[in-house]
Image: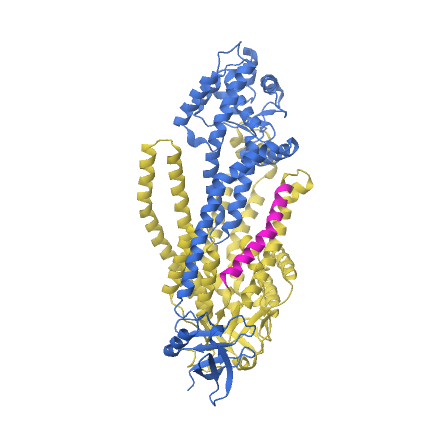
Chain colours: A blue, B yellow
């Protein structure tokens, strides 16, 4: 009457045994009728096994006794008596559904935190960062930025205005920055540099470093157009947008990067999610910087309309990665908003004709 | 199918009872759930996968039992997160410091996380072993995870310095360490495959992949006049091309040759990879010992190629299906962006479509790889085994306790996980 196999959990020896179903216990007996073990039904649990085999053990026991039953009639009878035996897997399926439900909830909550929470935290945190920390943050970003943007144009320095022939241009830029900086009266010192890049673009880093791309100077028709874009970038510095972006990027990569794990290359998903989220953050920041830039140009006695002209010319792309906005209706809206703030210029252009000519040659070929 | 009809010791073989269909179903369901739960489901999927593989692997008439639970993995992962979060924050702050520490922080992070990854891999192996039950006894592992991590990192350094030639010795040394700290009950394991044996079998492959690269580099060094090239580069951008050509008339030819050789090397590596995998797997399986229980493996190289062919075939089918399905998605994106040109909605729809497309393809290919190559390697490896000395199985004594899943959690957070 051997109808099962038993392992006693102390040795690996296999025992052919008989199983008797008593009123409250399952009895395991040897072929010659000796009682080997007696299991109360409420402590019996079913364990992982291939199809067609019911593997039983005692719940919470340190000794790994195992009883293996192939006979399906006997298996069904045990299932009926022992509550923790999940022969059909129904119990496990129900538990799994609960897990899926809660995981889905966690996903929704995670995305909500990424979308609303992270920007809110970054916005609240950025103004409280001491200037020294912000400066360091900017220097770290600067190293990264230079290594990605510097094409190492075979001998020519990345920064313009270093060579003797470029020095007058540098002096003109300094004059322009001085004028804007005095009007802005920021707590941080501004540092502006023209870099050898063909795109018509400019950017502000945390801590007051502003980069003007060579392509922007080429495209500008008068000094106020360059000044307007720089004023816009000063707006980013004043609003600490760069610092906020760094904090947001850090927060997002932490949130997704650690939780997504390694089942698929999660890194690319993180990157994609980040760029989608961040492009939505920057819209408001751009509008605010436009307003600031126009007001600053008014204050400095420049022509604030020039920022609008320049923006229309380059299609609104004043940040790398914002190229999507080319010919964007939003650009028209931005131009309109700037023109609404701009007043008629109080005096002549911010640079005299010879200075403007020098600035145009700041990146001598 | 039943474990009643084979007597212990009589059958020396290992069988795999699982069906491909059941494994496919498990993986596809898992992939869908991974997607909607942003990956949180992975603890359940990993457990399902192990239950399937363990439970369907029959050794001498008895199947293995995987006793781990998803909840243990989740807790292990959360513990790892608690440990790693401050470490990551520390590296982030250190990177902002422009002093020596800041400059070196990348290197320190790389080395530190490398050692931690190996530590995690060893602890994770302990978790898996203590959750593996066979004939009512559990496997376990002792030894020091830090000791293992240090060995592993040093060996990786040696392997890198010898351009891979030391790899067999690395594998053998690390495997000896792991196996002599592995126990089935009170039966101690060991690893007996010889590193020279693997070196002998893999040497030709190593030569074939490396020789074109060495040839390319030596040609570059020998033919190019480096001084002239340096001077030409230093002199500025004007007429750079002609000046480079003046100093190095053969430069263009040499670069073309180097690129051809590099391409040859990569192609050979890709074509030979299944052979390499088969050779290593067979060598490893043949070296496993538990007390007087020994193994030999009769794995054939062409069987592994078969698995890869299946992967390529399913991968191609999947790519075609994805291509067809992307047409309506692209049409939807097109409609939205023409109706609402330049709006945030249009941008969100197109970015969203891109993201979903990426996630589905990545999960799809990873599922296909698991269901073809990985399952086949497991099944082929198991079925190729011949065990000897199985009478020892009658008298093994219980020993060892279950360990925590923290290693699994660390491995997961550090992205060094495996089965």
Which portion, as a residue range, is magenta?
B69-93
- Quadrant of residue A23 within the rendered picture: bottom left
On the rendered image, what quadrant is the N terminus of chain B found in?
bottom left
Q: Position of residue B138 (x, y in %)?
A: 55, 72
Q: Position of residue B192 (x, y in %)?
A: 58, 71
Indicate whether residue A141 is drawn in magenta.
no
Answer above or below: position of A216 versus B302.
above
Question: Is residue B161 in view?
Answer: no
- Quadrant of residue A147 within the rendered picture: top right
Question: Is residue B185 in view?
Answer: yes
Q: Residue furthest bottom?
A: A32
Answer above or below: position of B351 versus B360.
above
Q: Position of residue B95 (x, y in %)?
A: 63, 41
Residue displayed at 54% across by 35% down: A245
Indicate whether residue B79 is drawn in magenta.
yes
Question: In this orientation, which residue lies closer to the viewer: B315 or B39?
Answer: B39
């Amino acid at each position: 009457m051997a109808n099962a196999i038993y392992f006693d959990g102390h040795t690996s020896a296999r025992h052919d045994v008989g199983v008797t179903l008593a009123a409250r216990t399952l009895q395991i007996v040897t072929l010659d009728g000796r009682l080997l073990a007696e299991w109360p039904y409420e402590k019996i649990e079913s364990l992982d096994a291939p199809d067609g085999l019911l593997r039983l053990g005692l719940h919470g026991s340190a000794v790994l006794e195992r009883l293996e039953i192939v006979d399906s009639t006997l298996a069904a009878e045990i299932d009926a008596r022992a509550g923790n035996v999940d022969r059909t897997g129904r119990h496990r399926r129900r538990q799994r559904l609960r897990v899926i439900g809660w995981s889905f909830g966690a996903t929704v909550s995670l995305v909500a935190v990424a979308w609303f929470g992270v920007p809110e935290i970054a916005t609240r945190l950025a103004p409280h960062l001491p200037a020294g920390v912000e400066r360091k943050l900017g220097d770290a970003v600067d190293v990264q930025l230079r290594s990605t943007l510097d094409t190492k144009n075979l001998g020519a320095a990345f920064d313009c205005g270093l060579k003797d022939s470029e020095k007058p241009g540098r002096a003109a830029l300094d004059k322009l920055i001085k004028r804007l900086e005095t009007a802005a009266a920021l707590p941080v010192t501004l540092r502006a540099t023209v870099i050898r890049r063909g795109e018509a673009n400019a950017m502000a880093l945390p801590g007051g470093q502003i980069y003007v791309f060579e392509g922007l100077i080429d495209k500008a028709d008068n000094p106020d157009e360059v000044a307007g874009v720089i004023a816009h970038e000063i707006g980013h510095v004043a609003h600490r947008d760069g610092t906020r972006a760094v904090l947001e990027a850090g927060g997002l990569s932490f949130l997704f990067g650690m939780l997504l794990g390694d089942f698929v290359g999660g890194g690319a998903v993180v990157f994609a999610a980040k760029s989608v989220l961040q492009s939505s953050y920057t819209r408001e920041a751009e509008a605010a910087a436009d307003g600031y830039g126009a007001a600053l140009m008014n204050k400095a006695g420049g022509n604030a309309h020039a920022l609008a002209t320049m923006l229309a010319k380059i299609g609104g792309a004043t940040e790398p990665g914002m190229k999507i906005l080319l010919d964007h209706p939003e650009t028209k809206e931005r131009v309109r908003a700037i023109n609404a703030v701009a007043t008629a210029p109080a005096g002549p252009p911010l640079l005299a004709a010879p200075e403007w000519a020098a600035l145009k040659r700041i990146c001598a070929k | 199918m039943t474990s009643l009809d084979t007597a212990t010791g009589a059958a020396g073989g290992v069988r795999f009872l699982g069906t491909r269909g059941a494994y496919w179903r498990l993986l596809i369901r898992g992939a869908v759930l991974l997607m909607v739960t942003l990956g949180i489901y992975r603890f359940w999927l990993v457990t399902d996968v192990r239950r399937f593989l363990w439970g369907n692997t029959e050794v001498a008439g008895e199947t293995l039992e995987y006793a781990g639970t998803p909840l243990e993995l989740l807790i292990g992962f959360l513990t790892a997160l608690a440990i790693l979060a401050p470490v990551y924050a520390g590296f982030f702050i250190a990177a902002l410091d422009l002093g020596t520490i800041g400059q070196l922080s990348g290197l320190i992070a790389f080395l530190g996380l490398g050692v931690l990854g190996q530590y995690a891999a060893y602890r994770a192996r302990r978790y898996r072993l203590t959750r593996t039950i066979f004939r009512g006894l559990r496997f376990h592992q002792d030894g020091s995870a830090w000791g293992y991590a240090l060995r592993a990192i040093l060996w990786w350094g040696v392997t890198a310095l010898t351009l891979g030639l030391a790899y067999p010795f690395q594998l053998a040394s690390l495997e000896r360490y792991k196996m002599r700290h592995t126990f089935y009950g009170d039966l101690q394991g060991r690893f007996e495959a010889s590193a020279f044996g693997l070196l002998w079998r893999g040497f030709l492959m190593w030569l074939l992949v490396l020789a074109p690269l060495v040839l390319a580099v030596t040609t570059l060094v020998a033919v190019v006049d480096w001084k002239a090239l340096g001077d030409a580069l230093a002199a500025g951008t004007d007429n750079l091309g002609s000046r480079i050509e003046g100093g190095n008339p053969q430069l263009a030819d040499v670069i073309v040759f180097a690129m051809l050789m590099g391409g040859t090397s990569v192609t050979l590596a890709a074509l030979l990879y299944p052979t390499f995998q088969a050779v290593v797997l067979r060598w490893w399986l043949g070296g496993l010992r538990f007390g007087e229980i020994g193994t030999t493996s009769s794995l054939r190289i062409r069987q592994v190629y078969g698995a890869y062919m299946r992967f390529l075939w399913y991968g191609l089918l999947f790519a075609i299906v994805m291509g067809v399905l992307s047409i309506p998605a692209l049409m939807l994106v097109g409609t939205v962006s023409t109706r609402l040109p330049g709006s945030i909605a249009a941008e969100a729809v197109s970015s969203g479509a891109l993201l979903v497309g990426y996630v589905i393809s990545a999960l799809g290919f990873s599922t296909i790889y698991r269901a073809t190559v990985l399952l086949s390697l497991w099944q082929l490896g198991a079925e190729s085994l011949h065990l000897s000395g199985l009478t020892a199985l009658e008298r093994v004594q219980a020993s060892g306790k279950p360990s925590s899943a923290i290693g699994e959690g660390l491995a997961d957070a550090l992205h060094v996980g495996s089965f």
